[in-house]
């Protein structure tokens, strides 16, 4: 699946991934390829974008996560490298 992580300042990740674990407003959510369409508000916590055995980690706060087709968009009010 294709994952994009953006903040108001810049795009911090744009590429393929095997899984995404994100801090939703009301708890953690996990997204795998071919996930059903989905939209949730982001809370504060660590966002993980997994590519095989490697993972990119970001500290995020606020914003939303959207799954449409085989694409995941994360638009966060604040994104920092974790």
Image (spheres, helix red, strand yellow):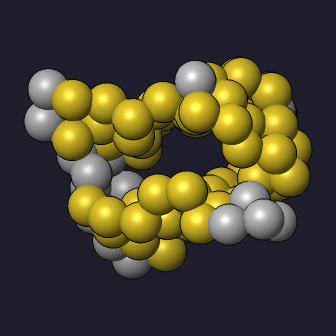
The residue at the far bottom in this view is 69
Specify whether 36 is left or right of 59. Answer: left
Quadrant in which the C terminus is drawn: top right
Among the 4 quarters of the image, the one containing residue 46? top right
Q: What x and y, as percent, mark residue 24?
A: 72, 35
Residue at 21% from the left image edge and 41% from the top image edge = 51
Q: Is residue 50 visible?
A: yes
Residue at 13% from the left image edge and 36% from the top image edge = 52
Looking at the rendered structure, the number of numbered marks drawn on it comes to: 0
Specify whether 18 is left or right of 5. Answer: left
Foreground pick, 6 / 29: 6
Q: Is residue 66 visible?
A: no
Q: What x and y, as percent, mark residue 61?
A: 82, 37
Residue at 82% from the left image edge and 65% from the top image edge = 8
Q: What x and y, as percent, mark residue 22?
A: 58, 34
Residue at 55% from the left image edge and 56% from the top image edge = 12
Foreground pick, 63 / 54: 54
Specify whether 7 is left or right of 38. Answer: right
Q: What x and y, as percent, mark residue 27?
A: 71, 23
Foreground pick, 69 / 63: 63
């Amino acid at each position: 699946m294709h994952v994009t992580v953006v903040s108001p300042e810049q795009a911090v990740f744009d590429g393929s991934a095997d899984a995404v674990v994100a801090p939703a407003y009301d708890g953690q959510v996990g997204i795998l390829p071919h996930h059903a369409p989905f939209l949730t508000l982001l809370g504060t916590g660590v966002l993980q974008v997994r590519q095989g055995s490697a993972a990119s980690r970001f500290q995020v706060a606020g914003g939303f996560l959207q799954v449409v087709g085989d694409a995941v968009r994360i638009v966060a009010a604040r994104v920092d490298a974790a």
